[in-house]
């Protein structure tokens, strides 16, 4: 089946200046870029006045469960994303030993949601990826094997360090999952059980990942008070393992830490001067999003979600929680300290009885419940079994642009898909094109498209994607550079963007004139050798 895109402004993803040309697709590949007068039987798309770019690549996605339940993943496709990377923050779907299904579903619910509509007995990454194949995903999917899942299989959910036998088991599990096609390893060192680990444990797993030229994707231990020490730890991991480092959702949180930004940049450059490969992704907003349980001190999470709930039910332990939040714990990223109770908002809950909490700050939640905000928050977490999402405001537009312009940066959404989500779920990529290219002129169009396409494809070794070139896969986004923009707000986030006219995935038109066609033509991309392929 042929498709001919006529009269478009080609922004090919390489970073080079755009140019006017036609583009011919045959089946799932680009076969010609240039002047094409006609092609027998080709479906013609008139792209006059539109930019023709590679499909966008989201390197930090939380569609891990939704891809099985609602495989269109409409919020991503409608903003031009054609490939995403699952398995983030060290806690995801696989591997999952059967004896841990119940506690792990609770641990995962705040990030990726929960569902009784799937069979949770898949156990391994290989079987999980087969499940994605079987539902025929709406876009291309890659997977990072999560540190927390590996640790759980090797030694359970306890707060302790592994012995030599358990550490070797972690290496073996990592190798098994890399052989199954994982593109790298992720960790989230503020999430349990990843936070229980020390550098040695991570280095040993990363040595295995480095053998496959995979990436180590990390939500580092601190993005706030101790960010410099945290970055030094990450650089040490890269130095001693030989793995490629990719920082997740890079930022510096809290006004009192903004003076560290210059030193943060120095550390990036120091690592690269040593020969360590370093990259990061970023979402284009001054607020973040995660599960509300991260506001609790680390000791509350020991032993998993069931133990969290027992501690939340204990009035004396609640007093200790409040004390630790108010006074801090060395080395702990205290979200309440750097955002404030009035700048942390509830975005999702599991149960209808607490639906009135969605959209409220923790201060407003306390007022609604007629309680101290801490008590109201602890009640909510207890009643919802810790499955509560949140948004927190942490930075400035100046800092967003500073990191956006860095050569290490590529774009991402990092969007949680449940409830009233962060607007980045629906609009991160169009926001860059509309606000930061057209309005603020922080990037040129070509620079922005490069950071959304070829840069992430190169970082994760995706063969044949991320650039419009003859012989590459036909993953394409066609948009209007004069109108493209995100529409969602923090109070009304569930809005598709404007200006995304066509999205083509593996040669199939998934979005046509701004409307989803209902077709799904994504595939699972697996690492084979050192390449990530179909």
Image (spheres, grey):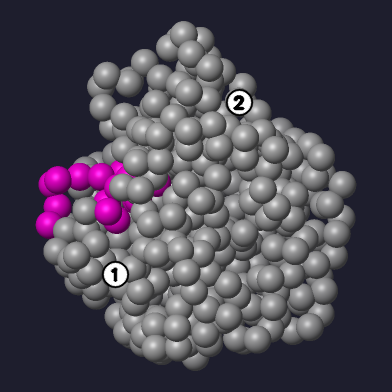
Tell me what residue is drawn at x 24 percent, y 73 percent: 124
Q: Which label is found at residue 13?
A: none
Whole-percent x and y of residue 168? 41, 88
Number of marks? 2
Whole-percent x and y of residue 328? 68, 42
Tell me what residue is drawn at x 29 percent, y 56 percent: 104
Left or right: residue 422 versus residue 434 is: left
Q: Is residue 34 or residue 374 the one in the foreground? A: 374
Q: Is residue 211 above or below residue 323?
A: below
Q: Is residue 265 or residue 137 the one in the foreground? A: 265
Whole-percent x and y of residue 153? 31, 73
Whole-percent x and y of residue 390? 48, 34
Q: Is residue 49 or residue 368 the one in the foreground? A: 368
Mark 1 surroundings within 10 Å by alpha-carbon count, few (fewer than 14), some (14 through 19), many (20 or more): many
Give the secondary structure at mark 2: helix
The answer to if 104 sits in the magenta stretch is yes
Disc nearest the viewer among 1 and 2: 2
Q: Is residue 376 above or below residue 150?
A: above
Please say whether residue 391 is visible from this viewpoint: no
Magenta residues?
103-119
Mark 1, residue position: 95
Q: Which label is found at residue 341?
A: 2
Please say whether residue 364 is visible from this viewpoint: yes
Q: Are marks 1 and 2 in contact (CB under 8 Å)?
A: no
Left or right: residue 146 versus residue 9 is: left
Left or right: residue 140 versus residue 235 is: left
């Amino acid at each position: 089946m042929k498709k001919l895109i006529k009269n478009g402004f080609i922004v090919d993803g390489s970073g080079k200046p755009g140019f006017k040309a036609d583009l011919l697709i045959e089946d799932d590949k680009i076969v010609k870029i240039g002047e094409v007068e006609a092609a027998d039987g080709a479906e013609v798309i008139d792209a006059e006045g539109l930019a023709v770019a590679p499909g966008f690549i989201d390197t930090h996605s939380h569609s891990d469960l939704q891809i099985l339940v609602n495989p269109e993943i409409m919020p991503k496709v409608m903003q031009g994303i054609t490939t995403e990377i699952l398995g983030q923050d060290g806690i995801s779907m696989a591997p999952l030993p059967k004896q841990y299904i119940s506690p792990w579903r609770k641990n995962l619910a705040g990030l990726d949601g929960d569902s009784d509509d799937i069979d949770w007995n898949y156990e391994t990454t290989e079987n999980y990826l087969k499940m994605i194949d079987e539902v025929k995903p709406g876009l291309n999917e890659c997977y990072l094997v999560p540190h927390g899942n590996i640790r759980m299989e090797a030694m359970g959910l306890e707060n302790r360090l592994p012995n030599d036998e358990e550490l070797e088991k972690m290496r073996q599990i990592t190798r098994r999952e890399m052989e199954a096609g994982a593109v790298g390893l992720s960790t989230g060192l503020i999430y349990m059980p990843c936070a229980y680990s020390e550098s040695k444990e991570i280095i040993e797993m990363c040595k295995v990942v480095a053998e496959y030229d995979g990436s180590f994707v990390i939500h580092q231990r601190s993005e706030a008070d101790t960010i410099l020490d945290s970055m030094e730890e990450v650089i040490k991991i890269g130095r001693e393992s030989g793995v490629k480092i990719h920082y997740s959702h890079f930022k510096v949180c809290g006004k009192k830490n903004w003076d560290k930004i210059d030193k943060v940049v120095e550390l990036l450059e120091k690592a690269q001067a040593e020969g360590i490969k370093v990259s990061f992704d970023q979402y284009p907003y001054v607020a973040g999003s995660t599960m509300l349980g991260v506001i609790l001190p680390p000791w509350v999470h020991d032993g998993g979600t069931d133990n969290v709930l027992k501690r939340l039910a204990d009035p004396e332990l609640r007093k200790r929680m409040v004390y630790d939040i108010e006074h801090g714990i060395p080395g702990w990223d205290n979200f309440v300290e750097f955002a404030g109770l009035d700048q942390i908002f509830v975005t999702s809950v599991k149960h209808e009885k607490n639906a009135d909490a969605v959209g409220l700050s923790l201060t407003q939640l306390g007022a609604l419940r007629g309680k101290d905000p801490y008590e109201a928050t602890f009640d909510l977490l207890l009643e919802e079994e810790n499955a509560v999402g949140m948004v927190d405001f942490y930075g400035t537009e100046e800092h967003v642009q500073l990191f956006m312009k860095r050569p290490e940066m590529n774009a991402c959404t990092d969007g949680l898909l449940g409830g009233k989500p962060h607007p980045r779920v629906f609009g991160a990529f169009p926001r860059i094109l509309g606000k930061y290219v057209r309005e603020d002129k922080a990037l040129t169009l070509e620079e922005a498209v490069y950071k959304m396409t070829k840069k992430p494809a190169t970082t994760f070794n995706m063969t044949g994607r991320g650039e419009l070139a003859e012989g590459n896969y036909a993953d394409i986004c066609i948009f209007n550079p004069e109108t493209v923009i995100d529409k969602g707000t923090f109070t009304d986030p569930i809005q598709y963007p404007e200006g995304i006219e066509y999205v083509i995935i593996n040669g199939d038109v998934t979005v046509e004139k701004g409307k989803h066609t209902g077709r799904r033509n994504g595939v699972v991309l697996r690492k084979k050798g050192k390449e990530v392929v179909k």
